[in-house]
Image (spheres, rainbow, N blue to C red):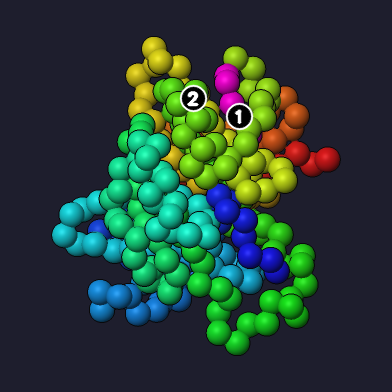
Amino acid sequence: MTFPARGSVVWIEIDTSDAKAVQDFYGSLFGWSFPGMPAPDGGTYHLIQPAGAPFPMGGILESSSDGREGIVLSAVSLDVAGDVARLKDLGATVVVPPSKAADGGDYARLKDPRGNLFAIWTPPGPPPGVDTGQLDPSAFAPKPGSLGWFEIGTRDIEASRAFFAQGLDWRYESDPGVPGETYDGVRAGTPHPSGGLRELGRDRDAADYTMPLFLTDDVSATTDKALALGATVLDAPTATTYGLTYARLTDPRGNRFGLFTPPKS
């Protein structure tokens, strides 16, 4: 396994005032498990472990004081302090200054100039005792229920393009899969797109957002299961012109997430 490239989105963090509710929903929907580890504040940080994946893909940060709910996308940084300075110069607002993360890595939280919360994070490395050189590379292929895509909805796609290109070295390619919609595939430290920028038209009554999308073998069936568990559908299962199927939802806490199945070919 090689170290994730700068700018790649490989981690999520769920902010919540009710960690058990989050675990019940996503554990039932995807089969995630939630091993605990000590947090710097003396509490417990619950890792998000997809079934069949070699490493966690995120964590749950519980706070009973501010009632904050949200899913934060974390992009890899090789120099958190340096990247924070660079992003501030580009118009970002620092929410959490460079700090030690609960998992032992370094991180910071910021808001982009559009007000979207995101994080930059230097992973601490593999768990103790895990020799990545002995792992089959196929073990790192996304499994059902794991993070496979991310999306940023923006009312000013030109501003978002410029900010993340200059701040995190993202590159873009037009995705014509949904006719009538401007959508950019994002190469975020990856040779192929691993996320997207979606233009929300300036005349639409919609706010900017960020969200993760999770891989599933059957978007429609997983959407139905999510509904039964208390989710709300924002965009019903839809197929692109090249055969990818996706849906957008909110979980019972009001957090956006998506589902997708790649084209069969």
Q: Quadrant of the C terminus?
A: top right
In the picture shown, does residue 221 fall above or below 42? above
31 on left or right of 86: right
Magenta region, main secondary structure: strand
The x and y percentages for residue 153 are 46, 31
The x and y percentages for residue 57 are 53, 62
In the rendered structure, which segment of residues is drawn in magenta?
181-185
Instruction: From the image, tell me which residue sits under label 2.
Output: 157
Query: What residue is shown at x 67% (from left), y 57% (from top)?
Result: 142
Element marked by disc 1? strand
In reply to whether residue 182 is colored magenta, the answer given is yes
Residue situated furthest bottom in the rendering: 129
Residue in front for this viewpoint, 106 or 234: 106
Element marked by disc 2? helix
In which quadrant of the rendered view does residue 232 lie? top left
In the picture shown, does residue 150 fall above or below 79? above
In the picture shown, does residue 22 fall above or below 55? above
Instruction: From the image, tell me which residue sits under label 1.
Output: 184
Give the spatial CA distance, label 1 vs label 2: 9 Å
Query: What residue is shown at x 55% (from left), y 49% (from top)?
Result: 7
